[in-house]
Image (cartoon, rainbow, N blue to C red):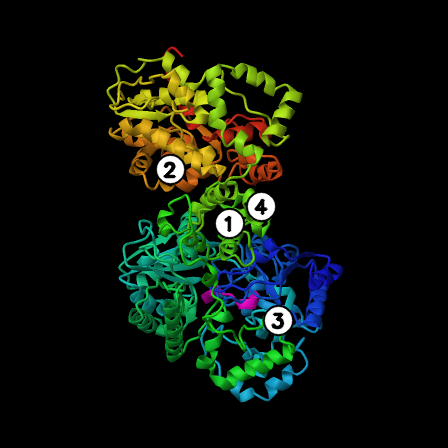
Amino acid sequence: MTALEGELREVVRGDVGFGVTARALLTMDASNYRRVPHGVVAPRDADDVAAVLEVCRARDVPVVARGGGTSIAGQATGTGVVLDFTRYMNRLVSLDPAARTAVVQPGLVLDRLQEAAAPHGLRFGPDPSTHSRCTLGGMIGNNACGSHSVAWGTTADSVRELDVITSRGRRLRLGPDWAGAPDGLRELVDGELARLRTGFPELPRRISGYALDPLLPERGADVARSFCGSEGTLGVLTEAVVRLVEAPRARALAVLAYPDESAAAEAAAGLLPFGPLTVEGMAADLVPSATALPRGGAWLFVETGGESAEEARARAEAIVRAADVVDALVVTDPAGQRALWRIREDASGTATRMPDGREAWPGWEDCAVPPARLGAYLRDFRGLLTAHGLRGTPYGHFGDGCIHVRIDFDLLTEPGVARFRRFSEELAELVVAHGGSLSGEHGDGQARAELLPRMYGPEMVGLFERAKGVWDPDDLLNPGMLVRPAPLDTGLRFSVLPREPVDVAFGYPSDGGDFSAAVRRCVGVAKCRTTSVSGSAVMCPSFRATGEEEHSTRGRARLLHEMLAGEVVTDGWRSTEVRDALDLCLSCKGCRSDCPVEVDMATYKAEFLHHHYAGRRRPAAHYAMGRLPLWLRAVSRTRTAALVNLLARTRPLAWTAKRLGGIAPEREIPRVATRTFSRWWERRRGAAEGSRGDLVVLWPDTFTEHLSPSVGQAAVRVLEAAGLRVALPPTVRLEKAPVGDGRTVALDPLSLLRGRGRVCCGLTYVSTGQLDRARAVMRRTLDLMEPVLDTGAPVVVLEPSCAAALRTDLPELLHDDPRAARLAAKVLTFAETLERHAPDWTPPRVDRPVAGQTHCHQHAVLGDAADRRLRAAAHLSGELSGGCCGLAGNFGFEKGHYEVSTACAEDQLLPSVRDAPDGAVLLADGYSCRTQLEQLAGVRGRHLAEVLADALEAERPDA
């Protein structure tokens, strides 16, 4: 323990972390920069903050205040002690609907304030796209804005009073009329009145530099307002009184289409007289699919409000009539509006990849110009990009003249970094020439502070330095930001990564085979830190269960980054810190779809475990559950399922088995089927002899084969009722395929003894990082499936996790075998098979509501559109919840995971069951989901195939 750490532990009641994990997690924010802190403190209250400042001032150690860590310019990183307000100082202290104010702590997430204010018809005006995870303290530090700033302004417009502790321990309550001003501030302003009245550009999004002009007497000498946007360099915020605004009762969204972004930009300012709530812009090169948008090359999202839906729609339609557009769409349905807004909110992550997959980075994320000059500025900006051979995708707050953009800078090589500097300098000149601000929302940080003299001139920047000296004479708070800044091209987070690709097992096709590039995908926008999910979203269940950064997708990505860097995490693939952070990753794959940049932590975890345990003894659970297909086949071959079930129900034997197998003692060992699905299949050969429909090959996955054969049996009945011919994969390697007769199950005892008699997706081996075994299993499977690959038959996979493994893990792990991609392309879900190969079939009418959860792998990899349509055709009404069941294959069975597993189930799944209407069908296509429901709720979930098969049986005349 260092002396600094020891002193802090003596005086702080909150958490003090100087270990590898605590430091590695906070080396970066959402910017291009990286700084390694000495340690991290999560203060419990203002007294803790004061104590930290006293200790650090005595030792001349910098202090950096941090909220959600979503800052774009580097201001939430530091080399001293980082104050993490999200753990304890995150409360809504009070809310006064009559006064329309709220008292908040700096770590309170914006969405929590919005949820508390909504029942009173109120809201906090500013709403950055990171509203589900950014904190009020961070918003005040950066003077954040968001899409509704044309109506409700910036955070500074919504602040009434601030409680602040200075670096020398003074506790101040900032407000208007010089309230709380530190000694010397008023004298400084009084001596510079002329400069302050003329030195700031007038535009709605001027965030750069210190906001000293609110201290002018004619502006109320508002010290709280002036403090906003100071990026933690003047004092440490401990509490804030903020204003709330009345939320419109109804909203409508007009989506206006234009030929290109310049036309959209030029039109934006003309819409402001209509009093819209938002005027947001984005171009086609940012949108993966424009099918939900009206035809055009760029769009303005213009939101209107009203006392009723009709009034809001009328205002939106008036804007459409007044706008000169190519096409337009007015949406009043709240769900439809949310879906469209999601496209815009995900842009900060989506924009980090060019259409060709090339990386793009922040750094010039939010310049702002007068709205009337936006069109001209964008044309000049595009020209500057072209001149430097760069590409970017502008989007953002067109109504306020503020543009977000990620640019494909090469920040990995010296020539690329040099071009980054030249472009930054020239762009700063361009912004100033258009009367703009280098920052229009996210602050200057390290990315732009060096260039502030180009915007303000040396005299005004000198005044900023004097103001910093009044507040923080020891330069203790976030040094290197805003004044006396670090150069914009130093401390780049990429500089510490390996220059050559590391040796890995997966192919990482979207990242050029480079694991470092895959890890770089995480830019820190932290969508994984949301504490609630809506719709079918999944990411990140372990963070929602624990609230700990290290158990978020971003936290794990940060630890992998530091592992590759080798400075904080020094033992590479053998790192216990990385292992422990990945331990609570459920491999749900939610991040693969819900993360805007498609970070795939499940794959990274499998990769890490593969290297971490190479040549070493693995945890018992890896042998017990990672090799589950082997054990279940042995039970099947020896026909000892009944004996195994009996032993599993004998308490002392079950306790011993769970202890030896690394299984949580709270778990029950699932029953093994006494007759496998394949044996049932053998006994019914010829049942569909007369069918002339398409041939489909039904995949007998491990769970269907040995644990839930009823699902396979039901699927066969439904597929055959739809007129399809069902076959199972070959069980021996054949030169030519006897596939197509609907009954191929050639048994070869010798082949089975060698473990090569059954196809297997390798899922359990992949999830436990046994990638060499997984590859061997997959290659044997491809050998068996070769005859099928030469047919037009799809491969129907009933277990979503196995289907996802075949679609993604198989081709990515066997990237050198072309057969893998061919098999992956053949994989269909049960619903997809019926939709594509029996399009004229009408499912039986069930006429019941549904409850349950969309399988996380279904959501992340396979998609559930076909399932939704099939349910609708069968008159199964209602929606399934999102999230993850928490069992997640081996995860929930492993010792030490039970508490997190049950917390994940309580997040979405179990509430959906408790709230289910009478007579609801409890759908759960995944074996893990059904097991979790049975063990935690005592109810039986059913695969959709089972529901339809029962309905078919009920429709039979003799039933």
Total count of labels: 4
| Badge nearest the viewer, 4 or 3 | 4
Question: Contact, CB < 8 Å: mark 4 with mark 2?
Answer: no
Which label was assigned to residue 477?
A: 3
Q: Secondary structure at mark 2?
A: helix
Q: Quadrant of residue 489?
A: bottom left
Asked if residue 164 lies in the magenta stretch, the reply is no
Q: Position of residue 347 (x, y in %)?
A: 40, 57
Q: Secondary structure at mark 4?
A: helix
Q: On screen, 504 above or below 756?
A: below
Mark 4 crowd level (few <14, some 14–19, many ≥20, 10 Å Cα): some
Badge 1 or badge 2: first in the primary sequence: 1
Outermost residue to the front: 615
Q: Position of residue 30 (x, y in %)?
A: 49, 60
User: Marks 4 and 1, how far apart in space?
Assistant: 13 Å
| Badge nearest the viewer, 4 or 1 | 4
Residue corresponding to mark 1: 553
Badge 4 or badge 3: first in the primary sequence: 3
Q: Secondary structure at mark 3?
A: loop
Q: Amino acid at mark 1?
A: Thr
Q: Position of residue 590 (x, y in %)?
A: 46, 44
Task: Using the rendered image of the protein, determine whether residue 258 is visible from the camera's viewpoint.
Answer: yes
Which label was assigned to residue 810?
A: 2
Badge 4 or badge 2: first in the primary sequence: 4
| Badge nearest the viewer, 1 or 2 | 2
Q: Quadrant of residue 229?
A: bottom right
Which label was assigned to residue 580?
A: 4
Q: On screen, 864 above or below 679?
A: below
Q: Amino acid at mark 4?
A: Asp
Outermost residue to the top: 958
Badge 1 or badge 3: first in the primary sequence: 3
Which segment is the magenta one? Answer: 140-151
